[in-house]
Amino acid sequence: MKRLWLWALLVIATMQAQAAVADVTDRVASARDAVMPYVVSIMVVREDHAQGRSQLRVASGSGTIISPDGYVATNAHVTDNGARFPGGTGRQARASGYAGG
């Protein structure tokens, strides 16, 4: 009888855990669907100076569209030493400023 109660409690706990995981999964999917239209990929052509020579290197990162006219916020390390920001959709971009210190 004691084993039957333990088994029943285990089944109930498992069902509750599965429901909680499903709820969290639904909330994460909902948040993802809400923000994905505003997330962009950023390609940067960097000008690095190594051993006295200038070298161009391609790097990438991500950003978030923050205004209707297309301003994108990203971390400064994504655009550091950026010489050009070619747009994959045929649009060019430029760094317009840095926040913080």
Image (spheres, grey):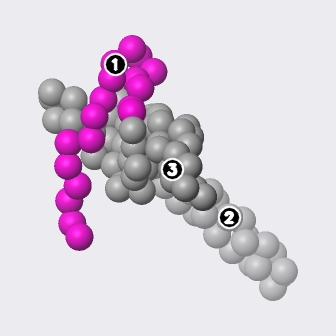
Sequence-first disc among 2 and 1: 2
Pick whichever, 10 or 45, lies toward us. Answer: 45
Magenta-colored span = 84-101
Q: Gap between marks 1 and 3, in whole Å?
A: 23 Å
Q: Secondary structure at mark 1?
A: loop
Sequence-first disc among 2 and 3: 2
Circle 1 residue: 91
Seen at 21% across and 36% down, the residue is 71
Image mark count: 3
Q: Gap between marks 2 and 1, in whole Å?
A: 51 Å
Pick whichever, 59 or 26, lies toward us. Answer: 59
Image check: 17 left or right of 30? right
Image check: 63 left or right of 88? left
Circle 3 residue: 48
Q: Give the vertical position of 97 relative to 39 (above or below).
A: below
Q: Secondary structure at mark 3?
A: strand
Kind of residue sitting beneath label 2: Thr
Kind of residue sitting beneath label 1: Arg
The image shows residue 45 at horizontal and vertical percentages of 47, 36
Seen at 39% across and 38% down, the residue is 83
